[in-house]
Image (spheres, rainbow, N blue to C red):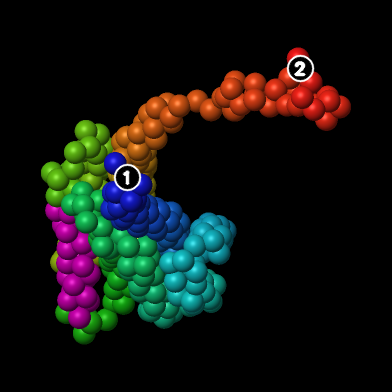
Amino acid sequence: MGPLLVFALLIPIGVLFAQAWQGQSSRMSFAASERHGIEYLTTLSQVTTALTDAQSAAVAGRAVDRTALARAVDTASAVDNRLGDELRTRERWSGLRVKIEALPTATTTDPETVYSAYSEATDLLLALYAKVRENSQLLQDPEGDTYFLQDGASEELPEAVVAAGRFVDIVVIQTKDQHQDHREEAAASIAAARQGLLDPASDLADGLQNAVDSTQSRTMGGNLLSRLDRFRRSMDTLAASVSDQTLPSADKLAAPRTEVQTAASDLSTTILAELDVLIEQRQDGVWTERLISIGTLVIAVLGTCLPLLLALSRRRRRRPPFHGPSHASHVAATPDTVPSQWEPAGAAR
């Protein structure tokens, strides 16, 4: 095998290796971006809990826990400082933070004004969820289980938590409005809020069940479904606590709403943890593929070049050794065979 043939064989080997390496790099980058999105979503879950708690307290006329809300905002700001440029969320988060910091906290503020201000903030928060899932490429995830998990964590569950808070707040506002002429309007508002409460919870349950059905993970079902059942029970209990005939007070709604928040926080943590594990395993699989690619390249190069090296080695062994001038030439050049210039001409030896 000549050098030109070896070179011709090495070219396609190198091209195939480069293509495989590029594809693996792209998948690694995709997974890393998704994991950054998961990290961002984790902090937004904390903001969601703190913000809806603050909203319900303000609407009910109670003191708002600004410390908890400020702590959640600071945590999200720290993550946005690291990942905001990559995920292109810097502007949206800055606007949301300004909106949160300007929210009313005085207990004397009109409940409907408070509700409107907080609703604007939660709308911006839900829009930020959508921005993170899109720019982190979670929305484009090709696997069924990871897709349904990210959909639940970044859309259905936040919407359900916000809807639960708004449902309670609307009921509280209507209990303070005792005008007879407003009863039909109040009933319609509560019915719409109840439907807005149940729809995302139902969609979340369907999506998480699809994730469990399509996964190869042996632990996902056990980790998710029990927490999902708790969350659905809490949502059903909250929805059933308000009837068309009677409107409970804010105090009676506090316990079921707190259970919704607790169950939602536990479920969100579990979903995001399961999602992160699946994507981390995907990264590990790509690293294994890279090691296999490198090993295959080494074997291919050695298999191609080794015959040429062996052939060159055999050629060197077949060449005769070089020993310098022959003995006869040495004898011809010795002084005894050359007439001396001091010897008389014709002198006999």
Q: Is residue 100 visible?
A: no
Q: Is residue 128 above or below residue 30?
A: below
Q: Position of residue 62 (x, y in %)?
A: 48, 64
Task: Spot the residue most to the right.
Answer: 342
Label located before the other in sequence (2 or 1): 1
Q: Amino acid at mark 2?
A: Ala
Count of numbered badges drawn on the protein = 2
Q: Quadrant of the N terminus?
A: top left
Q: Position of residue 349 (x, y in %)?
A: 76, 15
At 25% across and 34% down in the image, what residue appears?
A: 219
Q: Is residue 240 above or below residue 266?
A: below
At 31% across and 60% down in the image, what residue appears?
A: 138
Q: Nearer the viewer, mark 2 or mark 1?
A: 2
The circle drawn on residue 102 is none
Q: CA distance from mark 2 to mark 1?
A: 66 Å
How many other residues sit within 10 Å of disc 1, few (<14), some (14-19) or many (≥20)? few
Task: Identify the residue under disc 2.
Answer: 348
Q: Is residue 8 visible?
A: yes
- Label 1 residue SS: loop
Task: Spot the residue most to the bottom.
Answer: 181
Write the start and end of the magenta stretch as one range. 185-208
- Label 2 residue SS: loop
104 lies left or right of 309: right
Task: Identify the residue under disc 1.
Answer: 2
341 lies left or right of 160: right
Instruction: Tell me which corner region of the image, top left, top right, bottom left or bottom right, holds residue 119.
Output: bottom left
- Residue closest to the eye, 298 or 86: 298
65 lies left or right of 214: right
Q: Position of residue 237 (x, y in %)?
A: 21, 51
